């Protein structure tokens, strides 16, 4: 199978994940770029941020038109997480890769278990406490910077469990957080970015954007609790794969 076809297929799958679940894009993008398309880890991380930023922004626009974005909550999460993300990203380079991989698997597994145990509320709270949202956003940013991912797989559980959003608004709002966090990470990486293969990245990104639009329509047809369970199962699968990779 050619690199172009692999890029299109992988991009479509990642777009569906971002559009329907509000996360999982960078978790899927990095392994796809490394294991399917032959990118180095450094190039794959930077390329995935480009792909996830563009796809998240496109998916965000479609969710916004449906009223599924809580802008104030998302802005608090994103703003509070930028500085912690930058700080922990600088520290992460000193940590051995197996340790980072194991930490990623542990965090993803815990988030998945919380999603399985916590049912999405029937109603959203009338008000969101700024301090609570900002605190959760700062913690999310710190973990995101340390693990080097967009953070949607953590943002959705935080928006559901900490803030109390229903699943669909949590998905839409998480896309705002992903977009801002990914842009911040890209800004840090611009001075030392590895050479990138745009012949792969461009079609990958285009397929991901188209997949995100389909993912949003898919999310509208599936009940919130079902989306929550799907999201949790995806997280558990990713956590298991990463843990095996870390210890072998």
Image: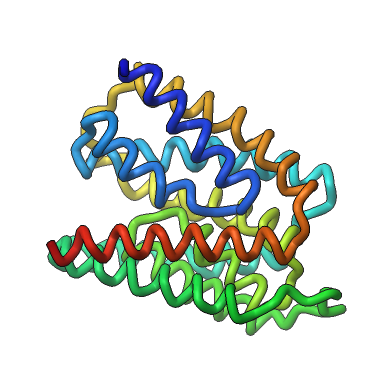
Residue 56's x, y, as percent? 58, 43
User: Which residue does the image show at 55% across and 38% down from the upper left?
Assistant: 15
Instruction: Give the vertical position of 239 relative to 186 (above or below).
Output: below
Can residue 84 be seen by looking at this rendering? no
Quadrant of residue 200 within the rendered picture: top left
User: Which residue does the image show at 84% across and 46% down from the upper left?
Assistant: 66
Residue 220's x, y, as percent? 79, 47
Can residue 132 be seen by looking at this rendering? yes
Q: Is residue 241 left or right of residue 84?
A: left
Quadrant of residue 231 within the rendered picture: bottom right
In this rendering, the count of numbered labels is 0
Instruction: Give the vertical position of 227 relative to 73 (above or below).
Output: above
Name the foreground residue: 128 vs 19. Answer: 19
Instruction: Give the vertical position of 132 relative to 81 (above or below).
Output: below
Q: Is residue 243 left or right of residue 83?
A: left
Residue 237's x, y, as percent? 41, 59
Which quarter of the rendered picture does the N terminus lie within?
top left
Q: How is the image coloured?
A: rainbow
Quadrant of residue 124 within the rendered picture: bottom right
Instruction: Give the vertical position of 190 relative to 184 (above or below).
Output: above
Name the foreground residue: 12 vs 248. Answer: 248
User: Which residue does the image show at 44% across and 51% down from the upper left?
Assistant: 184
Residue 154's x, y, as percent? 51, 66
User: Which residue does the image show at 16% across and 64% down from the upper left?
Assistant: 98
Which quarter of the rendered picture does the C terminus lie within?
bottom left
Q: Is residue 64 left or right of residue 135?
A: right
Name the foreground residue: 176 vs 234. Answer: 234
């Amino acid at each position: 199978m050619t690199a172009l076809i692999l890029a299109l297929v992988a991009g479509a799958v990642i777009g569906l994940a971002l559009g329907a679940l509000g996360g999982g894009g960078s978790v899927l993008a990095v392994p796809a770029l490394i294991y399917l398309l032959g990118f180095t880890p450094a190039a794959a991380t930077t390329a995935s941020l480009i792909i996830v930023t563009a796809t998240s922004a496109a998916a965000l626009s479609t969710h916004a038109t449906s009223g599924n974005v809580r802008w104030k909550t998302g802005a608090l999460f994103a703003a509070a997480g930028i500085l912690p993300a930058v700080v922990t990203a600088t520290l992460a380079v000193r940590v051995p890769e197996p340790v980072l991989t194991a930490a990623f698997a542990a965090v993803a597994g815990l988030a998945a278990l919380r999603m399985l145990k916590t049912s999405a509320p029937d109603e959203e709270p009338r008000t969101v406490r700024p301090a609570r949202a900002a605190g959760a956003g700062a913690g999310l940013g710190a973990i995101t910077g340390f693990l080097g991912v967009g953070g949607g797989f953590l943002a959705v559980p935080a928006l559901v469990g900490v803030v109390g959003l229903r699943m669909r608004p949590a998905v839409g709002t998480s896309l705002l957080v992903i977009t801002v966090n990914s842009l911040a990470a890209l800004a840090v990486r611009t001075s030392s970015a590895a050479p990138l293969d745009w012949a792969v990245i461009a079609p990958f990104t285009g397929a991901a954007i188209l997949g995100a639009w389909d993912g949003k329509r898919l999310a509208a047809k599936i009940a919130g609790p079902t989306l929550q369970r799907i999201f949790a199962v995806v997280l558990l699968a990713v956590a298991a794969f990463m843990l095996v990779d870390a210890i072998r």
